[in-house]
Each structure stands twice: as structure tokens, then as C-alpha cells.
Image (cartoon, rainbow, N blue to C red):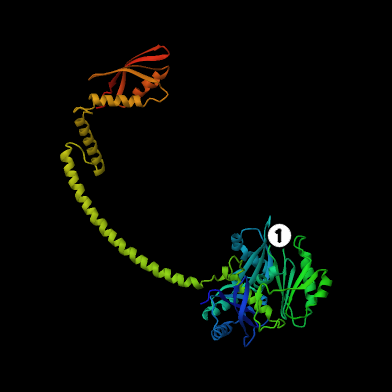
Amino acid sequence: MEHNKYLGIYVASDKTTVVLAAKTAGKIEVFDYFWVTPETPAPQAEQESASKFSFADTAAKIATLCAEKHFVFSDVAVAIDCRLYRQQKLHSEFQEYRQIAQTIKFDAEEALAVDAAQTAIAFELVGKQLSGADVSAYAASAEMMTEIIKSLQHNKLDPVTVEPDGICLRRIIDDSANGAVIAAVSQTRCFMICPAGGENKSIVRSFLTSPSQNKTSLFTSQIMLTMSTLTAEGRVSAIKAYDTTNKLDLKTLGEQTSMTTDSLDITEKITLPATLESHDGESLELIIAAGATAAFAAKTDKVDFRADFMPYQGKKEAIEKTIKIVGVSAAAFFVVLGILLQLNYFSIGRDIKKIETKFKNEYIIAMPGARFTNSHDAAQRLTREINKIKAVNSGMLSASGEDSIMAKMTYLFEALNSIPPNVDIDIDKIAITTKTMNITGSTNLGGNLQLFGAFDKHPKLTRGSTSIEPKDGRDNFRLTIDMKQGSK
């Protein structure tokens, strides 16, 4: 499968055009093409013919001819003839694409007088305003779209996009005219692309014609009508025409519209097969079919009937199937893993129960009279008792409590170290007995308050007799510190 080649299908009620195209060297190249004509063409009426539209035989012929011609492609794109959809410019009160997508069916139902439940709607945002946004909406019969898509799917030609023919044509020729009005003419249909100005998108219009109709008069009236509706920013003074009928008089068209006219050169945008005559009248159909395949180019805006109506599932089906298989396998794996973890949990639970029972029995022996509430609290109490025994052995505590000399010194320096750094303290003498601690020294003026506060806040010490004598700019103090009662 060649991933750079695509199949473009232009569906009309009287003829279907198929091209094999790819984007090479910055432009679309059509490698091969063919047409399929139904044995019994559908009526030409627009919406009335939708319920009678049949595409199954045409889709089967397309698949057969693609096989006979050895077409190799990666994806399929479809363009819908202007006789099979309706177009209307609407105004939405929203500016964001997602918000517009949620309400466009209701707006189109009112403006186009269609049943939203039985209609496939596509749209594009053509310009923003303070009050919302201008939207170009396209409506086609959902029954007809279902017939086309399912017929192609049945023949393994599931289309990724289904778009209006005017949008597909605009992709090819829009930027070839350098801001001029573009007129594209065939025997049965005409298109006009008008630059909108600013950051707005070019508006494409399509209208039907007949081989005998005067194309010059038709475009003169349509161009003048369109120019009258455009703002000064959107108006242009030139017309570029792509005429496949050789019946469009550019000189007369320019005189009647007061605009310069010239032929449109599309050779820089698309390469058509050498076997196709430029005056054949069918080159426009090939361009539209090729424009449908241009939707696969990166960063290309799409006006897709399938997006809301019947989202494309093609390549997703294989992914979904793989995900389902992986999902079932993963589910089975986690079930087995869960069973193993559950068994392991019960096994560990039994071991923990045995250990806890043994720990409780030994705790009661080691801590006579102590109540066993749970293993965590019992372990903490054992830790405290062990630390206390270690402190007694090291001399930090006496065997009867916390009244050893070393313990008192420890608490004393804890209090002194808690004094803020801005207090200038000078200790002259520390005398410690088995009952009290006497401290003599001095601080900077006012520092004695923070010194006394440090001892008052200590959980193990209490301040006894205190004397203060200011001298030589410092507060000389003498303190007596005792152990708090019940702190052992």
C-alpha cells in the first residue's frame, strides 16, 4: 500500500468521477482516472431525489475498476455534487468552533427548513464578529449519505471524509487567483469563489447551468449580485476564470462588470493526465475529485458531513479490535494477579496474627501491670523504657528518675540555648547540688526577661529565688533553678 496516494470520488446523480492522486512537489498530481455512469440515472431534482438515490451498483463498479486498473492507495475521500446538498450562510451567536458545532443543527434546521434528525450537516466558520460568527452551512439527506458511505464500506472503500464539491474545488484553485474572484465553468455546473477580505475565508458558491445557457450572462449577474453584498474590504477588481466549455466571453464579462478578466492557470496547483483534453469539459470534475484527496494534507480544514453524522471508523476498527484483545488479556492477567495477591494477603495476615499473639504474651511478661492496647502503642512504650534504661546506664538519669547531675545540666543548657541570639548573656558561675542549681551572671539591659522566660517555659525546670541588680549598663542576676515536681 502506497501511503502517499489517495482515491478521490466525486459523486453526482448522473455520473461518478474517480481519480488516483497524490501530493508531490507541493501540488496535486492525478495519476489515473475513470468515470462510472449509473444504468438508470437518478432524477436531477435536489432534495426530492435524495430518497430515490441509489449508489450500491456504482460503488461495486468503482471497486471493480480500481482492481482492474491496479489502483494502490491508502485512504478514500468523497466529494458530493452541489445538486445533492443545500448551502446557506448563517449567523451563530458563538465564535468558538466547538460551541458552533453543538448548535449548528438547530440553526440549519430553522434557516434551511430541514429536519435535523434526518439531515447530515457540515459547516465552516467563514468570519467572526462581535455578536458571534458567520457560518457557511451545508445540508444533505442523511439517507443519501448513509447509502453512499455504506455502499463504499461494503466494497472496502470506506471514505475518511465526505465534503461538498465547492470546498474540494476551492482547495485547488483558491490561492491561484491572488485575491481575484474565481469563476469555474462546466457544461452543467458553475462555481464562484469570492475573497472575503481580512482573516475571513473565501466564500464558495455553486449553481447549476445547462449546456445551452449563456455562461457570460450567468456569471455577469452572479458576480454583480455578489459584489453588491461585499464590504469595501472584501471587494476586488479582477476575475480569473477556469472555463472548460470555451463559451465564457472574458472580454464581455469584463466590460459588463467593469473588472479586469483573465484565464486561470492551475498548472502550479494540479497536474492532470496528458490524455485529458483541456477543452473536454470534464477536467473540472477531475479537479474536484482530486481536491477531495487534498483533505489528507497536513493542517487542512475540512467541511465533513461525516464528522457529526457518521464519524469515520475505518482504521480505528483494527485499533479497537487490538485494544479489545489486549483489554481481555489484561483483565485476565489482573484477575489472576488479584487472586495471587489475595492468597498472599491471607497468608501474611495469618503470620502477623501469630507474631502479634507472641508479642503480646512477651510484652505482658516484660511490662508487668502495663495494659496491652495494640502492637503500635506497646512498641512505643517499650522503646521509651529501653531509652530510659540506656540513659540510667550512661549517667544521664538516676535509677529513680531524672534527678542526676548530668540530667540537670542537660535541662539547664536546653533552657540557655533557647534564649534568642539578641540577648547578650555572660555566665559567671553555675553551682549544682542534688537539690538546686544556682546561676550567677549578667545580660544586656532588658535581656533578663527573656532569660527568665526560657526557664519558665522549660517543661522540666522551675525558677526559684531571683535577684537582679543593674550595674555598668548590664543586668546582673542570681537565679535559683529547681526541678519541677512530678517531672520524674
Residue on which disc 1 sits = 198
Residue 341 on image: x %, y %? 29, 59
For the question of whether residue 458 can be seen, the reply is no
Horizontal side of 455 relative to 268 (left or right) equals left
| Residue at 47% in and 72% down | 317
Which residue shows up at 28% across the image and 59% down it? 342
| Residue 140 x %, y % | 63, 73
Residue 470 screen position, x and y as percent: 40, 12
User: Outermost residue toward the right?
Assistant: 255
Relative to 135, is 409 above or below? above
Answer with the quarter of the image where residue 300 lies. bottom right
Q: Label 1's element?
A: loop
Q: Quadrant of residue 231?
A: bottom right
Residue 380 position, x and y percent, is 25, 39
The front one of 246 and 336 is 246
Residue 1 in the figure: left or right of residue 103: left
